[in-house]
Image (cartoon, rainbow, N blue to C red):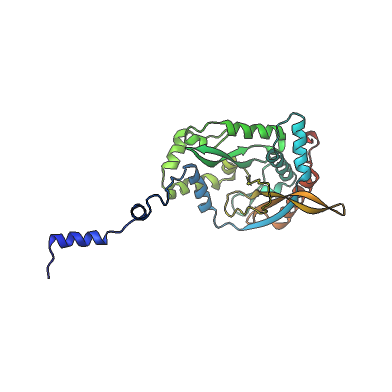
Amino acid sequence: MGSSATDHVQTTQVRRPIDEEDEGRRVKPKDYEIIDLPKSRLATLDLGRLYKDKHRMFGLLEVDVTLARRAARSLRSKGQSVSFTAWMIKAIGNAIARNRAAHSMAYRKNKNIVFDGVDIAMPVEKMIHGTPVPIPLLVRETDAKTPQAIQEEIDAALRRPMVDERDFVLGEHPFSRASLRLYYSLPQWARLILMRWLLRNPFRARKHAGTVIVTTVNATGKSAGWILPTRNMHSIAVSFGSITKKPWVVKGEVTIREIMHLTLTFDHDVIDGMPARRFTQDLVSHIEKGILGDGSFES
């Protein structure tokens, strides 16, 4: 049996797939919203794709930060506008400088390279087209800077206007507007080739992304929890979780203290367990004593 032109058109219309947007208009016109992904997120997605197969060690710690927060407040009382985050970044930089193997990077075949200076990357929240987006800030030589100097770099990043793609990396960096605009316009497979080439060399990797990353929620309240980063390019990641007040034993007595849920993530392909343990013990010890381990910068 044949079919008329009308039959054919009707059949085509019935079989035409209905996409989600069409269905949303038919059933619930305002049931959802489609939001464009900020271009700055593309690099994060690319890094996650590149480093998904790393072998990692995790340390989920409860750290008494009562004295550390008091030390930051003491600096502020002396006229230094130092946040607890800046104080912690300084403490991490100093601890790594004392335990340099903790930020080793793979170098050529069966070799590691250990840099002297500690360059720490951290996210700074910026508004892009009305949406809050984390933008990376690289603070160089944190072990040689004061907490005040670190805070000034954070404040400058917060004040910096977001104009175009070049501002998706805060602080001083060698990328031109044209190169970043080109990068963000490429499909992911091409971006991955470029990023793999860029970060394969540890000298380039340190120059563009540092040797350590710090992420933070830094929430204070009743909810206790750790951040668990699963994919990043750095050999060591330090993640600030929530801070809660808990009963804690201090000098044999139970008292209420401010406890941070701190996560340390190590790249086990580069860092062995013993160097990771020494760094962890050193960092926690200094934080809980509220000292930076550098007499010229003590509060």
Image location (x, y in percent) of residue 20 = 37, 55
Instruction: Pick the quarter of the image with the N terminus.
Output: bottom left
The quarter of the picture where residue 139 lies is top right
Farthest residue toward the bottom? Answer: 1
Position of 261 relative to 206 (above/below)? below
Q: Nearer the viewer, residue 193 or 59?
A: 59
Position of 91 relative to 278 (above/below)? above
Q: Residue at x 74, y 37 (%)?
A: 72
| 188 lies left or right of 105 | left
Q: Residue at x 23, y 59 (%)?
A: 13
The quarter of the picture where residue 252 lies is bottom right
| 143 lies left or right of 169 | right
Residue 168 in sight in this render: no
Farthest residue toward the top? Answer: 79
Q: Nearer the viewer, residue 299 or 173?
A: 299
Q: Nearer the viewer, residue 72 or 176?
A: 72
Image location (x, y in percent) of residue 260 = 71, 49
Residue 49 in sight in this render: yes
Position of 230 relative to 43 (above/below)? below
Image location (x, y in percent) of residue 113 = 65, 47
Figure disc tally: 0
Instruction: Pick the quarter of the image with the C terminus.
Output: top right
Image location (x, y in percent) of residue 60 = 69, 56
